Amino acid sequence: MNQFRTEIIIQLGLGLLQGLTEIFPISSSGHLALVKEFFNLNEFSIGLAAFLHLGTFFAILVWIRKDVISLWNSFKVSIPKVFLYLFNHGENPFKEQASSKIPYYMFISIAATALVGILLKGPANHVFQERTYVMLLLTINGLIILSAGWFSAGDRTMAEIGVLDYLIIGALQGIAVIPGISRLGLTLCGSLFRKMSWSEALKLSFLLSLPAALGFAVEFSELTSHGMILGVDALALAMGVLGATVGGFIAIWFLMLPKMLERKTLIFFGIYCILVGIFSYTYLSNLP
């Protein structure tokens, strides 16, 4: 009983950490990999880390549900117009209302994410087991978001960027399957470097993260029977997902504070990632 209770506390804590570090641009998988090393959680795998993404999926979905519904409605309305246009029976549906092309561009972006993510699945699993790589990539992640905070500028919206922009942003999200590189952070930075405004880049990053989080959880997780999921009791894992949901809500609320809605916020997170990478290397390099 005590061991089971400890397992629940561990999963709840890991879930909370995942939720916070997934929404903040500081790499949840990188932090979980370091926690695994610090506390000798040898049974903790990238599959379990991936499954916890369901928690942040729920948090983001609830937070931006109106945007998701609006996007879905726009897609439904545009379908017959697109078919008519393709068969030369109507005008270009995207000519007058540029926002109607967003769902189609997002499909392209998600496809790019899936392709790159699948190609990098093997290396990502390897990196998760190698603390030196994680520490180095966390530092690189910090430099990337620092540069976005300092050097990016623009005020373009989701409707104003083109198919190439969506393709690049989607591919960047796929690269972030590697532990140490923040998925939301790289997507956000890619959007900002494509001259989007902070609020629009954040909204696009949240929207693209929904299918990516589900895909990440399914692609990396290995489900087993006998009431055990990924080697962890189902109830304990459910507590982990709950913790990730709570952590996700807290992080989103923080990012949405009026003082946080600007590019300069990234400078703080960039410095944090660099310091964590350096500290972890200094501490863990002395361990066997």
Image (tube, helix red, strand yellow):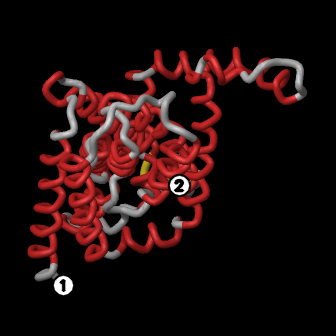
Residue 13: x and y, percent?
24, 45
Point 24% across, 25% down: residue = 256
Give the amino acid type for the residue marked by disc 2 in the picture: Ser
Separation of disc 2 and disc 1 at Cα? Answer: 29 Å
Point 40% across, 32% down: residue = 156
Point 36% across, 62% down: residue = 179
- In the picture, measured across the screen, residue 113 lies left or right of residue 259, that is right
- Residue 120, label in figure: none
The answer to whether residue 269 is visible is: yes
The mark that comes first in sequence, 2 or 1, is 2
Point 30% across, 74% down: residue = 133
Residue 252: x and y, percent?
28, 30
Give the answer, above or below, for where 84 lies relative to 40. above
Residue marked by disc 2: 221
Element marked by disc 2: loop
Residue marked by disc 1: 288
